[in-house]
Amino acid sequence: MGYRVVVAGATGNVGREMLNILAEREFPVDEIAALASRRSLGTEVSFGDRTLKTRDIEDFDFTGWDMALFAIGSEATRTYAPRAAKAGCVVIDNSSLYRYDPDVPLIVPEVNPDAIAGYAKKNIIANPNCSTAQMVVALKPLHDRARIRRVVVATYQSVSGAGKEAMDELWNQTKGIYVPGQEVAPRKFPKQIAFNVIPQIDVFMEDGSTKEEWKMMVETKKILDPAIRVTATCVRVPVFVGHSEAVNVEFEEFLDEEEARDILREAPGCLVVDKREPGGYVTPVECVGDYATFISRIRQDPTVENGLNLWIVSDNLRKGAALNAVQIAELLGRRVLKKG
């Protein structure tokens, strides 16, 4: 016996990936509904070897459906998630709306699976920010061994994290550089993204941090450990898919780089590719379409007591969004609903 599953936002980048991953992982689905806004009504999307026509989220009745994977942004989620939850359908939300709500668990299944028990307070589970998700997957096993005091992270985030319009802007600006008269002015980003990097993701806050940087700090504390201090600089780079992070970690205890490498090799969701030779590391191009969080450049930091440096790369549309949501659905099924 399987589940009745809803994917809301099925025509977007993340919604399409959710459908792909549900099919790839053979999630036990008895019935599936692909929802979208009225303007996308009837658009066809793929689910394995099936083609689904999208239905209007505004008129959809969530009664009798087991779970809904939401990828529709915070404003629409504010309207439809409570409606689904009230109807008895568990919402797994990819927006930022509920991440900081103390009554909503924020889950990365490899890191804090026991938090799933808290879903019943609102019938909603939050999916973390893409940059946070891949980082905590790598940090969790190291934290269990040596306790993390402080994390300093610089991100190199692909444009797909900002949606299809952002991907189009990179593509069109790149073409415009080579074709005189076809230059494309920035619209989605504050400055040109083609052949450039932009040290701003989301809006600025009073202390000079951007909201993306704030998210990484707050979410790491909620998912992993509130005692960990985190400082981040988040940068948008001209890459279509795949987020990268240079992470410096300070531990309470000494952790040798070789032991760290061994721990990460055995950790769920992690794949170590770390050869000290040209090309002996993973880049965003190589991680696209993969489930793993890749870790390279593992080495001691001699400038701080008990420090390590890591290079972390992951497909942000997968582990950073759709895959993590599906893994939460699998966890919910195993531990709570128990149908599949």
Image (cartoon, rainbow, N blue to C red):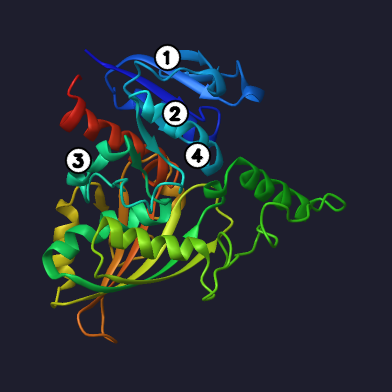
Which residue in the structure is indicated by mark 3? 117
Separation of disc 3 and disc 2 at Cα? Answer: 21 Å
Residue 246 horizontal/vertical position (percent): 39, 67
* Crowd rating for badge 4 (residues with CA inside 10 Å; few <14, some 14–19, many 20+): some
Q: Quadrant of the N terminus?
A: top left
Q: Which of pointers 3 and 2 lies earlier in the amino acid sequence?
A: 2
Label 4 with label 3: CB-CB less than 8 Å? no
Which residue in the structure is indicated by mark 2? 83
Q: Is residue 129 left or right of residue 125?
A: right
Q: Is residue 99 left or right of residue 255?
A: right
Which residue in the structure is indicated by mark 1? 49
> From this viewpoint, is residue 43 visible?
yes
Q: Which of pointers 4 and 3 lies earlier in the amino acid sequence?
A: 4
Identified by mark 3, the residue type is Ala
Which residue in the structure is indicated by mark 4? 78
Q: Nearer the viewer, residue 245 or 273?
A: 245
